Each structure stands twice: as C-alpha cells, then as structure tokens.
Image (tube, coloured by chain):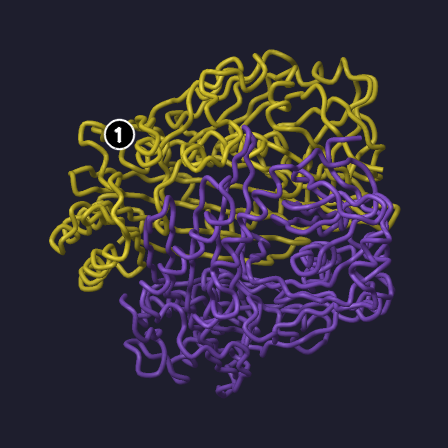
C-alpha cells in the first residue's frame, strides 16, 4: 500500500485479468434464464484519508475494495448480484443469481464484444494516491497554519484530505467493453472562532479529479483562510428574517439550488414512472427564459466529470433547459429504452454493490446578462446567500430546501449584517419562473459536493452565476 | 462457510491482531463483519428489482509508538491478510504520536456478553419470492385504499443478516449476529394543481413475526398520502409546533450531535460546559440504552470493547452526561461511558445505540387539544442545524392545527428556533412511543417556533 503505481487485478496483466472471452462466458450465464440484457461492472477502488487535528496528524487511513456487480434486466425488472472475489466460482454464482430475474423466455446470446474508446476529461499524470504521503501531510499543516494565523479568535482548526483512485471495467451483452481510471480528491479545513462567549464555525475546501497540481492553483492557505474568514464573520451573525422575500444567490456553490430545484426532477427514472413534477413537460416552459441549464460530464477535472458512465456510455454535455424550455431528461439504460432516446451518459452507481440510476454529473445554470453588483443593488430588502451546507428535494411535488451557512441581509441595495444559519424553501417549477436577474459571472463550485439518491452517493459538481429570485421563503426566526 | 458464522469471523479478527503484533505494532484492534442482503421491489404489481449478495470485510486499527493507522480490506485470504497487516503497521509511521493512542485499560473491557435476542432464525426463511409477495400485498393494499392513489413509487422489502466480531491485542474477543428486515410502501396521488403528493409507511423489526402485516402497512401509507392532497403554505408567524414520532426523531439525532464527546472536545456544540445544567424542559428525559432485548440498536459491547450500559443523558431536563468513546473521554479527562461505534472503514467514534426520548403521560390527541392555531409536523427536509450555535431551521410539512384539531395539509414552510429554546419549550410529551427505529420518540409539542411560509 505504499506509493507507487496502483493497478486493478482485473486489468490487462493483473493477477485476475478479465478479458473479452471470460466476460462473454459470464454474460452467457447471466442471460441463460431469459434476460434481455446483462452487464458486468468490475470495480477496484483504493482510497486514503488523512485527518489533522490539534496541530498533529491524528490518523492515516487506507483501504481497498474490489468486486464485480452483475445486472440482468428483463423488461423493466432488474436482477442484481455482486461478489468480492474474482474467482470463476464466485463470479458465476453472482451471474446465476442475477439471472433469476428472468424466469422464462428465450435466452439471448451476447453480441460480439468490442473495446470502446472514450474521451479523457481528467488527464492526471500522477494521481494523488500515488504521491508520497509526507507531501500531503504538509498540505494539512499549511491549511491549519493559515487558519490560525488569520485571526486570534480562531480557537480550533482541523484539516482533512481524502483521495481515491477507482478503476472500472464494464462489459455489456450488447457488445461494449470499456475501462476507465477515475481519480478523485478533496481537501478541507474547518475552523472555530470564539469571542466574548460566542462561537461559530466555518469551512473551506475543494477538489476534483485532479493530481497534486490542484494545489498550485488552489493553495491550502486559501482554504484555511476561507474557513477562518467564515467563522470570524459569522460571530456577528444576527437572527435571520422569516417569510417570503427577494433572495440573491452568489455565484458557484448556489448551483445546489439548481441541483435540488430542478436537477433531480429531470432524472429520467422519475419521469418514466410519472412520479416527477416534470413528467410530460418536454418542450414546455418550465423556467424563466433567462435560464439555460446543462448537465455536463465533460468539464475537465470537475468533481462530477466522467469519461464514461457506469453503464459504459461516454460522458456528455446535455442541454436540459434552453431559454426556459425543457429539452431533455438525464437517462440511464432502462429509461433510454422507454423514451426511445440515445444514452445521455448519466447512468451512475455508487459502487459494484449498486445498480445504476440516472444521476447528475455537473449541473450548471449558464451565465446571463446582468452585472452581479447591479443585482444586489436592485434588492430593497432581502437575503444574499453565499455558502451552503446542502439541500434536499421532494421529487414528487418539487418542494426543495437548501441550507445557508453564510448569508447576509440586503437592505436598500447594500449588503448588511451576516445572518444566523437559515434554510430557504421553495418549489422547483415555481422558483425557476421567478429568476428575474442572472449574472455574467458564472462560476463552478470548487469540487466538494456529494449527491445522495436511493441510498447511493456519487460525487457531483454544480455551478451558477449570481442569481436573483423574486420571491422565496426564508426560514429565519425573526418576523 | 456461512458468512455469518461468528466464531470464524472472531478467529480472523484475533489472527489480524496477532499478526499486527508480529509485524511490530504495540497494539491492534480488528473488526470483521460478514453479512448478506436481500432487497426486492415491486412497482405497479410487477417486480422492479431483486438484489441478493453477501460480503465480508475487515477493519484494522494499529498503534505503533502512539501513532495510529486505520485500514480496511475485503480480501481475507491468509496470504493477503499477512501482507495487509504488515502494510498497515508500516502506514502508522506517517501519523504523528498522540499520547492518547492506546487500547482501553484491560479492566474496562467487557468480560461477558449479554444475550440481547438480536437474531431470528425465521428472518432467513423469507426468499426472494416470499419477499416479492409481501411487497405485492402491501402495494396492492395502498392502491386499493382509494381511487385518489393514482401511482406508486413501489413497495420494498429489505433484509440484512449479519455477524460482527471484534478483537484487540489485549485479549478482548467478542462477536454477535443479528437480523433486521423492513417493508416500506410508497404511494403517489395527483393533486388538483398538477403537483404529485408522495407518502409512505413502513414496518421494521429484528424478528419477522413482529413485522406489521403488509396490508395494513399499505393502507396506512395510502391514508397518509391521500391526507396530503391540497397541501399549501400557511402565513408566516409564531405558533406551537407538534412533532409526530416520524419527524421528531430527526430532532433527537440533532441533539445527539451536540452531546457526543467528539463534538465537545472539538468545541462544535452549543452545549459545551453544560453538564449538570438545564438543557430542556422538565418533561424531557432521554436515554441511550444498548441493552434493550430485540432493540434495533442493541449491542452486547461497544466499538472499543467496553461493556454496554444504559446512560441517562437528559433527566427531567437536566443534562446528566455527554456520551463518550475511549478517545473523546481521554481527550476531556473523563471515563468512557461505553458509547463507541465502529465501522469497518473508519475510526471509532461516539455513537448512539437505542436513543430514546422517554414517553410521557399525555395521549397524542390531547397534545393538540389546547392549540388554537399551530403546526403538526409529519416530515422535515434539509440540513439546517448549526451545532456550534444551536441555530435550527428546516423545511417542514404536515397539517395545520386549528382549535385542537388537525386541519388542512401544509407544505413548503420552514420551522426555526434556537435549539436550546426549542428543547426548553417542550410542554407536552405523548405516551405513544414505538421502538421501530434505533432513535425513537413519542409525539411531542414545542410551545412556540417561527413558521415561515407566505
């Protein structure tokens, strides 16, 4: 487990190499009971994490997981099984178990398997996982020192670095064989400020599918300082207002709003099942005409970028909403069949233990015509939202919330006092029609978000310019 | 080999500790878990998913010169184990020494394991077909409940059977196995304004025979979903808020996050230096009890190998103790009270077992009776809790309370309060406690919160 080249045992030359002929035998077993389609998902994931607390490296962690997931579909039904050792017996048993979803019918033979060439959206010369640890530990010290140096009121700092290298091999009964190596890293600093009996916390962090070069453009000091800045700024936080009012969302992380308000509702499984508010809305106006929303798996080094999705389809840029008109859903294999469309590169899964679902990659609201400062100046009384801890949506009715960790009152067009932690709640279809101004200042979030759905977590990216929403409910405590 | 043969897993854990010492570790702890899952889903009467698989994994913590490494692997073959342990010990050199990095004192370790009735032979008897049948019955009952049920997210039956063994290099060795199964039914209705309304009901237990029957789960799911038709915002204002047990549970989870020893030594809690003081209304008593027979969160020992014990956390509104694992207790100059949790892939941390707001004496209906205008909360959304300050704000849905009775359904509002005020303002606690989940509470009322809507 020391630094050095990591390689999946199922790769060419590996200890349990999987070639097209072996995969074909497994696919034959998978389809033997009459399944329509089968795929194999081999996954090798090496991960490490480093925690820095009380000015020392508190612990280092390492782990490796390896396994095969076998999926068989028959109509809209899915049979799924997995195994953790790549012996023929274990793999064959998984294939036979998954096969049982089909109880009858003619067995389809897999077609000839062809290796697929895919794009490269995250070229990394040396993954962080293959870099010697002392270099990474120094990053934690630097972030910690920067946070402490920011202000004497900073009383606690912790920093963390988590990294993984995932290698996948997908083989499908419709003839695809594709391999990918997906690096992922995330760096974070958390600081606590204390003054006159008041305490507040702040965080800073980022990452993506980068190697160590990430830190050339995003030095650890910038994250440490940011964590400390938020903690100190929030010491003066006052009670947030309650009720419906104008809200301005800062560029970047506010993409969370998009992810919750509309992203999930445009995942094709909910629309195939008619359980989303956006079912049957293709071609219709679902947002203000200022809004063009894309889901883009091709943004280089982005946390949500994928060369290939977990069903073997290349990552793509998909326009979901164009000038307010709904153009497309995000698809997985089952939904493509239902809607009669091409794959959109959104079939993703948490690991070999999970079946794929339509998921977002990097969801972005594209830039508009307005100057960000002009947007703030236009607000009589409202809230400016800058940092968030997360959000959630109810797919069926479109209600969503997202939680602000740094926000400010706007009065007469000027930023005022920082506000205590508060939620915004809205309804997706409703809120997007109330986008009345959109900034020129599009920004991507710095790689920290993880999306959960059906118990499966996948890394995602978001991005927006500054956005003005004419009315949304702010969940403060002051009437 | 059965993946849930406790003795076999225990031998692997003990072997890993022995190898760690052989490779130069001063001390080691190993957790081995093995289990099998069955998960099936029916939607609109047809199978949508059948998933079956078994897995095993080992998590190791080694100490060398007070430096710690945490590692995990799913490759438990003899040759691989030796190499994995050797590399883990090597990895510890990267960490920095922490004087608190040592095993618990031998005298503190659990010496016997109570039988908590965590395993049910009958649980394993349900096969994929039997599970699908239960789902079909549950979903059909929901769809048959009312013509207003127009669609379905389906019905899901899940079962996990598993075993866990834990050993340390000071001779602790324990192991146990358990079963748990659940059925959830999720109907959907179409509302007049074009919105869809979803809802659900569920049953879960370690023992198969104690599951609620699928038909009544389906009917209750439908009843709850139909009741949401016509939901809308209400006007912003302060009012009493009643939490049903499904929604209230989340408030207990948030409260745990500020009484864990980890949060205290990190100063990430508004309840710092508050032991022995009033943190809630006199009606509030909260216990963490891992020793409840058949309890969903029960365990015979904790993640450090210490005996399980019941802790009264809040007694009549007074904070009696924080919850500690060995590390956080040492960090604060205290003794662990046996609340360590541990997973294969991570460090030991403070966790809850069965974390329960004790029931009161008021009937749930009577809790509503004195309220002229209030909010009955059945669901919450989002993450709006600042542990450091106690500021709380979350999305909520439920029903308007008017003149002591449940009125029209409410959605798209937020509820907000400072957490300290919220718990001190609890003025009624119901007698309707149900232990389906490891964090549980009865219905309870908060005299005043800010509800933001229109």
Quadrant including the N terminus of chain A: bottom left
Confirm whether residue A14 shows in the render.
yes
Mark 1, other Cα within 10 Å: few <14 / some 14–19 / many ≥20 = some
B160, above or below A291, in the image: above
B150, above or below A115, in the image: above
Provide residue A301's location: percent of width, then percent of height.
Answer: 54, 73
Provide residue B342's location: percent of width, then percent of height.
Answer: 36, 42
Of A18 and B286, nearer the camera is B286
Name the residue carrying label 1. Answer: B113
Confirm whether residue B139 shows in the render.
no
Q: Chain of mark 1?
A: B
Identify the residue shown where x is 61% and y is 18%.
B424
A456, above or below A367, in the image: above
Provide residue A135's location: percent of width, then percent of height.
Answer: 35, 65
Of B135 and B302, nearer the camera is B302
Q: Which chain's colour is purple? A: A
Of B84 and B417, nearer the camera is B417
Provide residue A78's location: percent of width, then percent of height.
Answer: 56, 63
Which colour is chain B painted? Answer: yellow
Q: Does residue A104 appear to the left or right of A373 in the view shown?
A: left
């Amino acid at each position: 487990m020391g630094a050095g080249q990591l390689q999946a045992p199922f790769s060419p030359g590996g200890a349990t190499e999987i070639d097209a002929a072996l995969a074909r035998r497994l696919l034959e077993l998978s389809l033997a009971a009459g399944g329509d389609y089968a795929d194999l998902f081999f996954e090798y994931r090496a991960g490490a994490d480093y925690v820095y607390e009380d000015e020392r490296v508190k612990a280092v962690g390492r782990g490796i997981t390896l396994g095969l997931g076998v999926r068989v579909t028959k109509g809209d039904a899915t049979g799924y099984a997995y195994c953790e050792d790549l012996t023929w017996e274990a793999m064959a048993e998984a294939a036979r178990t998954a096969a049982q979803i089909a109880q009858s019918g003619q067995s389809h033979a897999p077609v000839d398997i062809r290796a697929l060439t895919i794009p490269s959206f995250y070229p990394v010369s040396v993954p962080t996982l293959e870099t010697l640890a002392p270099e990474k530990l120094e990053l934690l010290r630097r972030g910690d020192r920067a946070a402490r140096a920011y202000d004497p009121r900073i009383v606690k700092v912790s920093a963390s670095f988590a990294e993984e290298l995932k290698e996948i091999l997908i083989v499908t009964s419709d003839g695809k064989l594709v391999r990918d190596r997906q690096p992922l890293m995330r760096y974070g600093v958390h600081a606590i400020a204390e003054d006159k009996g008041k305490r507040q916390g702040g965080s800073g962090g980022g990452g993506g599918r980068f190697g160590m070069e990430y830190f050339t453009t995003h030095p650890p000091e910038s994250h440490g300082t940011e964590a400390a800045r938020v903690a100190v700024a929030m010491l003066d936080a006052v009670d947030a207002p309650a009720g419906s009012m104008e809200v301005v969302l800062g560029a970047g992380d506010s993409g969370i709003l998009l992810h919750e308000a509309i992203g999930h509702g445009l995942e094709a499984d909910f629309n195939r099942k008619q359980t989303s508010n956006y079912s049957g809305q293709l071609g219709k106006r679902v947002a203000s005409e200022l809004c063009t929303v894309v889901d883009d798996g091709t943004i280089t080094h982005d946390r949500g970028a994928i060369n290939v999705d977990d069903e073997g389809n290349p990552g793509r840029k998909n326009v979901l909403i164009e000038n307010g008109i709904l153009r497309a859903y995000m698809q997985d294999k089952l939904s493509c069949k239902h809607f009669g469309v091409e794959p959109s590169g959104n079939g993703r899964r948490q690991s070999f233990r999970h079946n794929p679902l339509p998921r977002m990659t990097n969801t972005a609201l594209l830039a508009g015509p307005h100057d960000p400062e002009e947007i703030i100046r236009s607000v009589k009384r409202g809230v400016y939202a800058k940092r968030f801890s997360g959000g959630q949506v109810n797919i069926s009715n479109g209600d969503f919330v997202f939680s602000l960790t740094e926000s400010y009152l706007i009065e007469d067009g000027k930023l005022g006092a920082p506000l205590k932690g508060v939620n915004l709640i809205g309804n997706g279809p409703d809120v997007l029609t109330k986008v009345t101004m959109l900034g020129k200042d599009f920004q991507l979030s710095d790689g920290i978000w993880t999306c959960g759905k059906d118990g499966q977590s996948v890394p995602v990216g978001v991005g927006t310019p500054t956005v003005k929403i004419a009315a949304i409910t702010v969940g403060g405590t002051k009437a | 080999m059965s993946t849930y043969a406790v003795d076999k897993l225990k031998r692997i854990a003990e072997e890993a500790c022995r190898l760690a010492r052989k490779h130069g570790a001063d001390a080691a702890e190993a957790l081995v878990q093995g289990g099998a899952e069955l998960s099936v889903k029916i939607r609109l009467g047809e199978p949508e998913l059948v998933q079956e698989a078994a897995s095993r994994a080992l998590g190791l913590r080694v100490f060398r010169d007070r430096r710690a490494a945490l590692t995990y692997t799913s490759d438990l073959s003899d040759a691989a184990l030796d190499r994995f342990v050797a590399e883990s010990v090597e990895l510890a050199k990267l960490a920095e020494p922490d004087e608190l990095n040592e095993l618990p004192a031998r005298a503190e370790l659990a010496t016997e394991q109570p039988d908590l009735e965590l395993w049910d032979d009958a649980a394993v008897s349900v096969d994929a077909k039997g599970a699908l049948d239960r789902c079909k019955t549950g979903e059909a009952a929901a769809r048959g409940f009312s013509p207003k049920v127009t669609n379905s997210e389906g019905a899901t039956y899940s079962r996990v059977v598993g075993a866990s063994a834990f050993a340390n290099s000071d001779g602790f060795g324990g192991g146990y196995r358990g079963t748990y199964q659940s059925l959830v039914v999720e109907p959907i209705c179409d509302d007049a304004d074009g919105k869809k309304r979803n809802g659900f009901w569920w049953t879960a237990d370690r023992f198969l025979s104690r599951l609620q029957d699928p038909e009544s789960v389906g009917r209750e799911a439908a009843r709850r979903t139909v009741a949401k038709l016509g939901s809308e915002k209400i006007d912003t204002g302060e009012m009493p808020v009643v939490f049903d047990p499904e929604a209230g549970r989340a408030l207990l989870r948030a409260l745990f996050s500020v009484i864990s020893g980890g949060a205290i030594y990190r100063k990430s809690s508004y309840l710092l230096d508050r032991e022995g003081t009033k943190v809630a209304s006199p009606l509030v008593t909260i216990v963490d009890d891992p020793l409840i027979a058949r309890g969903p969160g029960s365990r015979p020992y904790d993640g450090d190998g210490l005996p399980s014990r019941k802790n009264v956390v809040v007694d009549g509104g007074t904070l009696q103790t924080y919850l500690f694992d060995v590390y956080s207790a040492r960090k604060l100059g205290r003794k662990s009270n046996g609340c360590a949790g541990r997973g294969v892939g991570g460090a030991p941390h403070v966790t809850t077992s069965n974390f329960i707001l004790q029931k009161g004496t008021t009937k749930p209906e009577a809790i509503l009776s004195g309220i002229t205008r209030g909010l009955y909360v059945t669901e919450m959304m989002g993450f709006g809790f600042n542990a450091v300050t106690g500021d709380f704000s979350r999305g909520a849905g439920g029903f308007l309370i008017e003149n002591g009775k449940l009125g029209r359904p409410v959605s798209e509002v937020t509820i907000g309060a400072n957490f300290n005020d919220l718990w001190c303002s609890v003025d009624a606690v119901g007698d309707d406690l149900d232990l389906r989940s490891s964090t549980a509470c009865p219905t309870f009322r908060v005299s005043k919160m800010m509800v933001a809507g229109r």
